[in-house]
Each structure stands twice: as structure tokens, then as C-alpha cells.
Amino acid sequence: FLRKGATYRLLGDSPRPHAFIDEGTPMNDGPARVFELGENSRLREILCNSVNGSCQFQMTVTLDSNIECDTKECQVDEARVLKVHDVYYEYIRPPCVEQVFFNDSKKVTYKNSFRHSSCANPLLPHAAEACCTEGNGGTLTATRYTEYVFDHERVNFSAANVRCSRDGLSQCDFNFVQGDGVVGLHWTNSACQIAIKVNPEGKVAIVYEAMANIIHPNVHKDNMNYFKVYWNGDFPRNSLNENGGNSCGNGECSPLEDGGCFCYIEVDEEAVFSKMPRTDEVLSKLYIGA
């Protein structure tokens, strides 16, 4: 949010965001703890756009160069609503390609374990921290980091772990998160497995497996949200009820009773180029961009 091209839109005197809605997003007064930029902030200076000592706020501001972070800005993975004097700006997150499949996923859930849970990429700012005291009688009641910057703040899994340790606490697979700023998803320390179902046409549906009371229906094992993919060769076929089956990829996957195969996912990453490529080489070999 401090890089060249970052865009901010004026909200006026209300901190209520327009570009995102989280569970718990206030409908009128906005968040209780807001991200107020410091007096020495270069971003604050740009958004203020001072003329003769008075801010001349613009409807939209786009950074024309990278700028350095100041105090609290250095602690934030991704900004949302920022306060400049008595006025609020909303950071407009750019369209971004995020991979469907990833390794080492962690379970995220809302403030209690009886809400929907899902899998999240630990490298991305998808959730807030939830910190527990070890050996608290099995209740596993968590709290936010005492110095979190703003409500609706999201950090990556590693940053959440650091925040908990600063409070002398640790991440856990909590039952409930109590206290202020408890909105949106929160990280747990519980692993979450990503799998796919492959139907007889070679289409796939994503399945999340986690120790959770409720998995979101879009990624539950019974979901029927199949989509087309491009296979490198043949795909897993169920030999029990399909002609020409291949034992679900020669046993790499498991047969499903109603047809198709069930497969666990592992992502392999490798460098495409060993030296700086030409433009035509990039366009011919790299198909996903952000």
C-alpha cells in the first residue's frame, strides 16, 4: 500500500469502508480502532495535499513513487481505512491473481469455532491473529494482540505468530475469540488440507479438510462446484464405475462411491528462467500475471 500505483479513495468524515465487507463490518459508525497516520508520515503528507497550511483533500490519490513506512505503517501487511486529520481514506486494493492451490495451509475461522472455517495461504494477509494462554483449562479462549493497529486488520500467519509472542501468548485452535476488534477471520495453528474431486469429465471441485465443526459449503466435501482445468496428459479416472478407468491415477487418488476420484494436492514450484528473459519469452511461458 506504499508502493507506486497504490490508490486511495476519499470517504469523508465516516470510516465506513465501501470496497470491502467483513463479518462484523459496522454499517454506520465504522470501526472502533482506526488506522491513524502519524504526523511524520509521508503518506499522510501526500493525502493531506497541504496548500498554505490547509489540507486540500482529493477524491482519489495514486502514489507516483514508492514511499517509506512510518511507525505503525511498518507493522501493517495491508491497509484498509486510514485517518488523515479528521478525514478518512480507503485503500483500494489492486486486482490480484492468487493461486487456488498452495502448500502448508492453515485453518482460519470466525470468532467462535461454531462458525464456518476455511483454509488460507499462510504467506498472505488473510486473517487476524488469535492468541491463547497455554494450559487455560481447555477453554481455548483467545484474544487479539493488544497493540493491533486497526479493526479489520489482516496479517499473514508468521506476523500473527510474532504478535502473539509479544503478548507472551501463542496461537491455538481456539473455541472463541473475545475482546475488542474481533471481526472477520482469525488464524489458528491447525493445519488444513486442500484436496480435489475429479469427475468423469476431468473437471475438478476444491475440497478443504480441517478439524472444524463447520467447513464452508463452497469447499465442503459434498460441494458440486466443478470447473474445467487443463491436464498434462490423462486425468485420474475411477475404474469402479467408468469405462477406461485408470484406478484413479494408478492409486495416487481414491475412488468415490458416486464416481470420480478424490486427490490430495501438493504444489511444486520451480524457476522458469535462469537469467533475465526477453519479453517474448515471458509472454510465451508465463500465463498468469498480477
Image (cartoon, grey):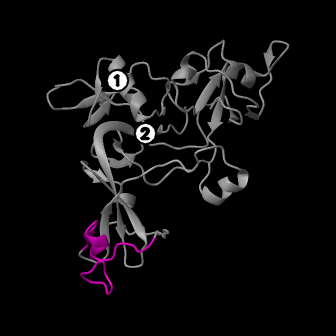
Q: On residue 184, which mark appears?
A: 2
Identity of the residue drawn at 34% across and 23% down: 164
Tell which circle, 1 or 2, labels the residue nearer the N-terminal end. 1
Q: Residue furthest left?
A: 137
Q: Residue furthest front?
A: 274
Taking the magenta stretch, the answer to whether it contains residue 163 is no
- Rendered location of residue 108, percent (x, y): 36, 42
Residue 144 in sight: no
- Rendered location of residue 78, percent (x, y): 55, 33
Q: Quadrant for residue 110, please give it.
A: top left
- Rendered location of residue 83, percent (x, y): 62, 24
Identity of the residue drawn at 43% across and 39% down: 184
Taking the magenta stretch, the answer to whether it contains residue 237 is yes
Identity of the residue drawn at 66% across and 12% down: 40
Left or right: residue 9 versus residue 221 is: right
Q: On residue 90, which mark appears?
A: none
Residue of label 1 = 164
- Total of numbered circles in the picture? 2
Left or right: residue 81 versus residue 130 is: right
* Residue 278 vs residue 35, the one in the foreground: 278
At label 1, the amino acid type is Cys
Number of residues whose C-alpha sits closer than 10 Å to that of mark 2, classed few (under 14), some (14–19) or many (20 or more): many
Q: CA distance from mark 1 to mark 2?
A: 18 Å
Instruction: Check disc 1 and report its element: helix, strand or loop.
Output: helix
Segment tinted magenta in the rendering: 233-256
Left or right: residue 182 versus residue 66 is: left
Left or right: residue 127 versus residue 278 is: left
Q: Is residue 68 above or below residue 110?
A: above
At label 2, the amino acid type is Gly
